[in-house]
Image (cartoon, rainbow, N blue to C red):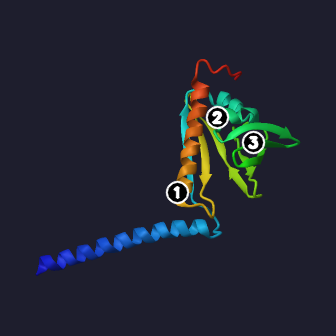
Amino acid sequence: MKQILIILILNSLMLSACQHSTNQKDAVRQSTKLNDMTYPVKHISISINKSADEVYRYASDPENFPEWVAFIKSVTKQNDLWIGKSDIGDLKIKWTPPNDFRIIDHQVTLTNGEIVNNPMRVVPNNEGCEFIFTLFWLPNRTEKEFNEDAKAVTADLQKLKEILESNNAGIDL
């Protein structure tokens, strides 16, 4: 009888834990649908075997953007904005001014007028560096879309690493 009681208690605890886990996932999904104070994020980073200054100089130059960001086909400067040609139309991109902190934040205005903030940092790591991108899970985006965005950013950062670490990059750093 004592063993049956213990089994019932353990089953009850496991069921409660599963429901709590499901409730947490629902809360995360719900927070992306509501306009809460903050959105869930993924910090996506890659180690690059080049100095932080070299990586910053290359990655912060908007003209290099199409070389390592797959969905941007070309960019042109228009006053203080850059226009990025993409499969979804022309995107307006506003970059952070050059700075000593290696911050490469930029705002992208989509064709529907929505503004997406894209924080990026280059952080020294010994003689190389870490390139960090913060991806926000925005409202009206599904979990699948958010994960696809994360895969795309990861692929772009891998391309950036390949370009910068290549001996034949032909890039003036």
**Residue receiving disc 3:** 85
The CA distance from mark 3 to mark 2 is 14 Å
Q: Are marks 2 and 1 in contact (CB under 8 Å)?
A: no
**Is residue 101 among what the camera can see?**
no
* Label 2: few (<14), some (14–19) or many (≥20) C-alpha neighbours in 10 Å: some
* Mark 3 secondary-structure assignment: strand
Rendered image: mark on residue 144: 1
* Residue at image coords 53%, 66%: 29
Rendered image: mark on residue 33: none
The CA distance from mark 3 to mark 1 is 25 Å
Quarter occupied by the N terminus: bottom left
Q: Amino acid at mark 2?
A: Trp
Q: Nearer the viewer, residue 28 or 5?
A: 28
Q: Is residue 169 left or right of residue 172?
A: left
**Residue receiving disc 2:** 68
Marks 2 and 1, the one that precedes in the sequence = 2
Rendered location of residue 31, percent (x, y): 58, 68
In the rendered view, would you say 17 is above or below 95?
below
* Residue at image coords 70%, 41%: 104
* Mark 2 secondary-structure assignment: helix
Q: Quadrant of residue 98?
A: top right
**Is residue 173 among what the camera can see?**
yes
Q: Quadrant of residue 65?
A: top right
Rendered location of residue 153, percent (x, y): 59, 44
Q: Nearer the viewer, residue 97 or 112?
A: 112
In the rendered view, would you say 155 is above or below 31?
above
* Residue at image coords 61%, 45%: 133
* Residue at image coords 55%, 52%: 42
In the rendered view, would you say 134 is above or below 34?
above
